[in-house]
Amino acid sequence: MKKKVVTLGEILLRLSPQGNKRIVNSTFFEINYGGAEINVAVDLANLGIDTKLVTKAPQNELGDAALRHARSYGVDISNVARGGEKIGTYFLESGFSVRSSKVIYDRKYSAFSKVSIDEFDLDAIFSDACLFHVSGITLAVSSEAFELAEFFMKEAKKRGITVSFDFNYRSKVWTLKEASKGIKKILKYVDIALAGYLDFINILGLDIEKGCQDETILDCYQILYPKVMEKYNFKYIVSSVRKVVSASKNIYSGLLFNGKEIVSSKEYEVDIIDRVGSGDAFTSGFLYGYLTEANDNYKIEFASASAVLKHTIPGDANLVAKNEIEQLFKGTGYDVGR
């Protein structure tokens, strides 16, 4: 079975104050490169899966550096378009304790926001692919990016390639109304949906009589999963479950619905060094289990443990090995490796 994964999305330049400083009083910013789809590509490549990133990057040193980041982790960038005015950028102020993290985007007029379908060779991109992954963030970047993502999803479906989609709603990029309209339009192409109960309620418009609280979260999913599956007939719906203790401590787990039963992972209490990329680590962890044809329990345990470990690693990429992830969910991950 072919194992190459294709991801489509914008590479972002991330600028962060050092330590727990605030943006307003910072004179130095640390550089990282990331973005939802490139993070998934890097994480999967790190686990031994062949991955290909499709994007558009400016023809300047920042574009070169972003692509060098992807290539350094073994991601295929042979189908990247070059051009445009600038690289998409965001500033991240990391929260701590009772102070939440903060993100400021500077993505307007970025190279990827002005992307067009005729810049890519679909036959070359999909010739050896078994799975295509994209997220709602890409749909939200611009009308051009939405058109490109929809075209890629439609083309992947036509070629018998599994389509994975992470709802990944960001209120600073588009409104709930815009997200609902856009996401509903492309769900007919999706095989694997990564989404949570708020996505089902706020974006898909599903009703639930009682509110979803931490103590009743599984009850909510038992009601909502069948409703979603009946309407969209996905192969899998996969959800991360995050209970926020503070900005620097969360309780994390995962759920999977295969159309017949809900499979849940272990629950972890994690102290956070860097939360960015944890959702992408969850996605890549699940996709790794799916691509290696593991059982459903392994898929969701691997996804959750992968995400938990990402919280402890600075930067966007989840730089952990397969055995480290397995050691965590098998209960052997805390001792010093000697």
Image (cartoon, grey):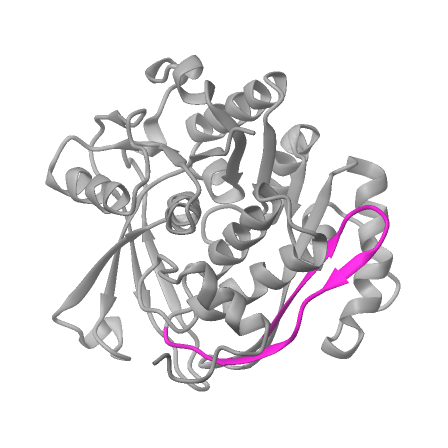
Q: Is residue 265 magenta?
A: yes
- Horizontally, residue 61 falls left or right of residue 204, namely left
- Where residue 24 appears, x then y in whole percent? 23, 73
How far across and down, in percent of the image, does residue 322 sit? 46, 59
Question: Can see residue 279?
Answer: yes
Residue with the most extreme front position: 338
Task: Name the residue located 25 percent from the left edge and 66 percent from the top edge.
Answer: 16
Q: Is residue 23 magenta?
A: no
Query: Looking at the figure, which quarter contains the C terminus?
Result: bottom left
279 or 139: which is nearer to us?
279
Q: Residue at x 65, y 58 (%)?
A: 298
Quarter location, residue 299: bottom right
Would residue 27 appear left or right of 87 to someone viewing this image?
Answer: left
In the rendered image, is residue 211 in sight? no
Where residue 139 appears, as percent x and y from the top left, is 50, 36
**Location of the N terminus (image quadrant):** top right
Tell me what residue is drawn at x 30 percent, y 42 percent: 74
The structure residue drawn at horizontal position 63% and vertical position 30%, both measured from the top left corner, is 186
Q: Where's residue 174, x and y in %? A: 51, 45
Q: How many marks?
A: 0
Residue 7: image quadrant is top left
- Viewer-closest of 306 and 198: 306
* In this view, 54 is above or below 75: above
Magenta-tinted stretch: 252-273
